[in-house]
Image (tube, helix red, strand yellow):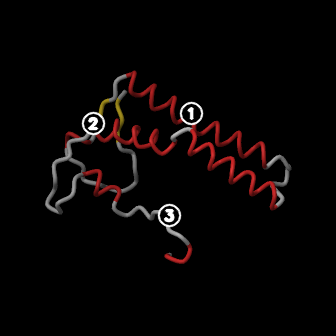
Amino acid sequence: MILKYLGGNDLNLLKDNEKIFLSGDEAINILSEVEYMLISLRDIARHYYDNADGEISIEKRALYCEETTKFIDENNITNKLAKIRETITEKFNLELGDDDMDDIERAMENITYWKPNNQK
């Protein structure tokens, strides 16, 4: 499988990084993990948000949050996502540019990560 960056920003990637290659097994493993997470989280939401108008009681909302957290924790979702990131990252040439960053660091530097409300 060939992955090519299709983002809107001109990242000025190294030539080696304009296309990266995943084996079929790597691509299927990544897709299987993403499918498992996505469909499971969708099904958890559908179970608790069963009202057509999307309304949910405070009690059901708490159960939904608890079930989602339980799913993430018991199924090692953060570890699975880290493995996906590792599989893709290892395909890149991580040579540093003039800014002392590799292409991945440069592409990720403007991501706004979650913070508690009192730290935003």
Q: Which one is in front, 16 or 30?
A: 30
Q: Would you say 107 lies left or right of 75 here?
A: left
Q: Position of residue 66 (x, y in %)?
A: 68, 52
Does label 3 or label 2 sit earlier along the sequence?
2
Q: Which one is in front, 63 or 41?
A: 63
> Which residue is label 2 attached to?
91
Q: Would you say 71 lies left or right of 61 here?
A: left
The 10 Å Cα crowd at callout 1, few under 14, some 14 to 19, many 20 or more, is few
> Which residue is label 1 attached to?
35
Q: Secondary structure at mark 1?
A: helix
Do tag 1 and tag 3 residues touch (Cβ < 8 Å)?
A: no
Residue at image position (22%, 53%) is: 102
> Which residue is label 3 attached to?
114
Do tag 3 and tag 2 residues touch (Cβ < 8 Å)?
A: no
The image quarter containing residue 20 is top left
Marks 1 and 3, how far apart in space? Answer: 23 Å
Q: Secondary structure at mark 3?
A: loop
Does label 1 or label 3 sit earlier along the sequence?
1
State the residue lying farthest toward the top: 25
Q: Given the image, on which type of amino acid does mark 2 rest?
A: Lys
Residue at image position (14%, 60%) is: 98
Residue at image position (40%, 22%) is: 25
Q: Given the image, on which type of amino acid does mark 1 rest?
A: Glu
